[in-house]
Image (cartoon, helix red, strand yellow):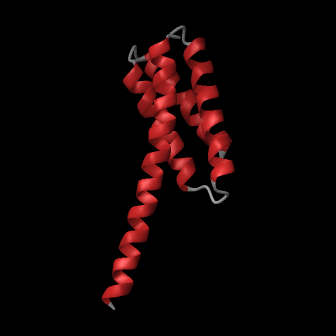
Amino acid sequence: MLDTMKKEIIEDIKKANDAGKITAEEIKTVVENAVSKVVQNSKEGTSEINTIAKEAVSVAVKEIKEAGSESKEHVDAAVNGVIDGIKKSTKETMDTIEKEMLKSHQN
């Protein structure tokens, strides 16, 4: 699961760099999407989410450095992508639970 996330972040940052589109917004979006997917599939709870967050930031920052595009703005974008990815996944989970609860009360 973490390996898939790391691979996705690496590949997407490399694609953005190769296309000349390595912006803070692009980095944030790449990291957010990868983290959201893996958190959504996580069954272990907060300890696993903590590991996911650390790994995502680590691999994103490494790729940003290798792309020669390291800046405070890009590192901040990676961190914000992790945070937003976790929030997005949590909101989707809560929305699903809410829909299930509403269905059960309608029957």
Farthest-out residue, top: 68
Q: Residue at x 36, y 72 (%)?
A: 99
What is the number of callouts on the image? 0
Identify the image quadrant of residue 62.
top right
- From the viewer's perspective, tell me whether residue 51 is left or right of residue 18: right
- From the viewer's perspective, tell me whether residue 62 is left or right of residue 88: right
Question: Is the residue 75 above or below the residue 104 in the image?
Answer: above
Identify the image quadrant of residue 106.
bottom left
Residue placed most toward the observer, 98 or 33:
98
Question: Is the residue 53 above or below the residue 28 in the image?
Answer: below
Residue 61 spot, x, y in % from top left: 59, 21
Residue placed most toward the observer, 9 or 107:
107
Residue 9 spot, x, y in % from top left: 55, 32
Residue 26 spot, x, y in % from top left: 40, 26
Q: Residue at x 56, y 50 (%)?
A: 39
* The C terminus: image quadrant: bottom left
Residue 57 spot, x, y in % from top left: 59, 29
Q: Residue at x 57, y 56 (%)?
A: 41
